[in-house]
Amino acid sequence: MKKMILAAASVAALAFAGPAVANPIVIKFSHVVAEKTPKGQAALKFKEEAEKLLPGKVKVEVYPSSQLYGDAKEMEALALGDVQIIAPSLSKFDKFTKQLQVFDLPFLFDNVGAIDRFQQGPEGQKLLTSMASKGFIGLDYWHNGMKQMSANKPLLVPADAKGLKFRVQPSDVLAAQFQQLGANPQKLAFAEVYQALQLGTVDGQENTWSNCYSQKYQEVQKDFTETEHGVIDYMVVTNASWWNGLPKDIQAGLKTAMKAATKVNNDTADQLNLDARKKISESSAKIHTLTPAQRGEWKKAMEPVWAKFEGGIGKDLIQAAQKANGAGKS
């Protein structure tokens, strides 16, 4: 009798509780920068929008500032399924596909508007799936900004860089661009650059205005040249097997959330770069702007770098990027 009463009570409890609710899909979004950066703010926007569009179906956990994994380990963590989304710099992908080296080619894109047109066009969108065979799918591109050069002298013509030591990211294309100028590229971690400039271990560097200002390079560099010679952007990447296994409604909701996050990132990045440029101009450092003729000289000097990497990237991809320059004004 006692067992019958307990069984009846259990049935009643289940009936009162209603149908069982499935646990939400947990999405771990890991990145290496602070929450106040454009990438950090965009990741939080993605969480907000995803959980609003898919209530009870997904739970997004954002881990900024390398809390889970740093630059060296995040791709491995994604491949193993320990995280579901990361957003590395485009320069970090050349070991998986040489096609993405197109974004490192110097003086290929005239401005952020041209980069947008290329990334949102058919060729740029195809690149999001260029690593699918390696287990990675890109969800979108996020801007950091156009790169500028700095040194303790004006860099107005290519010959001005000859003999100088420049810090670069770990990219074969970026190393080749300075070698082409007769300069010496030094691959250094981002966190080491200020001290290297201060001590003279390197003479110059390339980065976005916002990165230069946030790292206080204006304290250890006398001259900045507004070269806009390259881009530092990110690709938001997910594990292909995990993504392809999601229900279609979940995929659709996450894509919509990603669009909102991309807008937050790009709007924030644009404003931060404008603000940073102004603050550097108000410091003791001087900003030099290339004339159209000077820019043409730099571009011509860099063309051998395009030729060197054309085989891996693809001539058609480089041509598509060039066409984006003439498709309209940013």
Image (spheres, grey):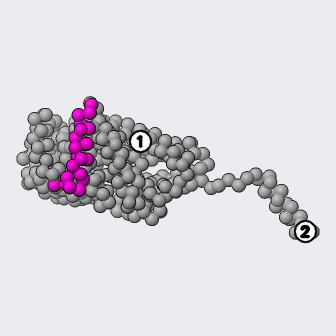
Q: Position of residue 204 (x, y in %)?
A: 17, 51
Q: Position of residue 302 (x, y in %)?
A: 13, 47
User: Foreground: 268 or 87?
Assistant: 87
Distance from the alpha carbon under mark 2 to that under mark 1? 61 Å
Q: Mark 1 or mark 2, which is nearer the start of the sequence? A: 2
Q: Which residue is mark 1?
A: 262
Relative vertical location of residue 4 with respect to residue 221 in this rendering, above or below? below
Q: Position of residue 153 (x, y in %)?
A: 11, 45
Dominant secondary structure of the residues highlighted in magenta in the image: helix
Q: Position of residue 26 (x, y in %)?
A: 55, 55
- Name which residue type carries label 1: Thr
The quadrant where residue 311 appears: bottom left
Residue occupying the point 25% across, 49% down = 102
Quadrant holding the C terminus: top left
Tag 1 secondary structure: helix
Q: Would you say 18 lies left or right of 295 here?
A: right
Circle 2 Cα neighbour tier, 10 Å, few/some/many (<14 / 14–19 / ≥20) = few
Residue occupying the point 86% across, 61% down = 8
| Magenta region, residue range | 308-328
Magenta segment includes 323: yes
Tag 2 secondary structure: helix
Q: Would you say 319 lies left or right of 242 here?
A: left
Relative vertical location of residue 198 with respect to residue 258 in this rendering, above or below? below
Magenta segment includes 174: no
Q: Would you say 24 lies left or right of 5 here?
A: left
Q: Which residue is mark 2?
A: 2
State the residue lying farthest toward the right.
Answer: 1
Quadrant holding the N terminus: bottom right
User: Foreground: 235 or 190?
Assistant: 235
State the residue lying farthest toward the top.
Answer: 329
Residue 71: which numbered mark, if any?
none
